Amino acid sequence: MHSNNDILKIISSQTKSSINEISVVTPSMYAAIFSKFANAHGTVLGNESELAKNLLINECAHLTSLQDQASKSAMQLSKSTSKAISAIKEKDDKLLENVLEETQKLRLEVEKLKESVYKDTLTNVQNRKWLNDNFLKDDAQKFRDSGTLAIVDLNYFKIINDTFGHVIGDKVLIYIASELKKTRNSIVRYGGDEFILLFDKNVSAQKAKEILDELREKILSKRLKAKEEMFQVSFSFGVSEYEASQKFSNIIEKADKNMYEDKMAIKQRVTGI
């Protein structure tokens, strides 16, 4: 069963997805859209101040934990660096070996820290922060290198949530994410039921389409079970190649347009549950 925090995360995700196409969003507009989704989930926002307080406490505790881990890692790195300088100056092989061991441990800790910052907690794929830090130039939001991007959007996901509940909906998201991982490309959870695949620059748009077409057919051939009922899952996708220094927003808009064209076509042969 979902906790209040889990429900609020779902509502927040749905709200963010719904305002993506709106160029200007005022606080009152956001509140109205958020309330609409909250009502759909049967969530009462009368105790909003208490909910906000609890969420703030949890987020601050998480950020403090990350800050503490980062601070400890930085201090350890500083100590190891000082030891390494001394060892080199004194030609102390034993001390160098000790520094190497400490550095290897520190590297593992830093990798764990990076994973906690960059992973989507539900699907265990990368999140938007990872995309921004690894593929885009800081403030410009432009690609660092060339490649091919695909946006994947689940079909009839709202019907699945409304019919079977959000626990099953979450399991569907986890299942789709695990299937997308099998393409051996970088996967990012972009929105509530949207994912981004980042293909190597050697993979053309046509090749990316072939990969996703094959995966979709494989998923369509399976039937999932919930509450003694069987149902089918599918997704639509749009692909766009990009060059270094092109704006991410322009590429995602192009891929999104291609995805909606694909969605219109796939819904001719795949109906809701």
Image (cartoon, helix red, strand yellow):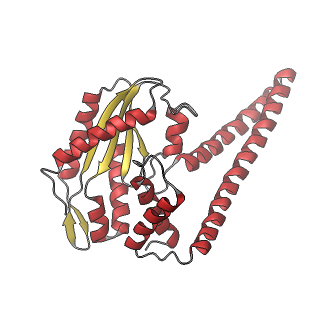
Q: Nearer the viewer, residue 164 or 238?
A: 238
Where's the C terminus, which quadrant?
bottom left
Residue 86 quadrant: top right
Is 47 situated left or right of 243 in this image? right
**Residue 185 visible in the snapshot:** no
Q: Residue furthest left?
A: 269
When the figure is inspected, residue 261 is found, relative to residue 85, above or below; the finding is below
Is 112 situated left or right of 170 in this image? right
Taking the spot 29% from the left edge, 39% from the top edge, the residue there is 257
Where's the N terminus, which quadrant?
bottom left
Taking the spot 31% from the left edge, 49% from the top edge, the residue there is 153
Is 165 situated left or right of 124 in this image? left
Taking the spot 64% from the left edge, 69% from the top edge, the residue there is 53
Residue 247 quadrant: top left
* Position of residue 59 measured from the top left corner of the image (x, y, whole percent): 63, 60
When the figure is inspected, residue 123 is found, relative to residue 210, above or below; the finding is below
Q: Nearer the viewer, residue 129 or 39?
A: 39
**Residue 228 visible in the snapshot:** yes
* Position of residue 196 measured from the top left corner of the image (x, y, whole percent): 38, 42
Is 227 situated left or right of 67 in this image? left
Taking the spot 79% from the left edge, 29% from the top edge, the residue there is 84
* Position of residue 179 measured from the top left corner of the image (x, y, whole percent): 32, 48
Q: Nearer the viewer, residue 93 or 199?
A: 199
Q: How many marks?
A: 0
* Position of residue 21 measured from the top left corner of the image (x, y, whole percent): 39, 47
When the figure is inspected, residue 114 is found, relative to residue 58, above or below; the finding is above
Residue 36 quadrant: bottom left
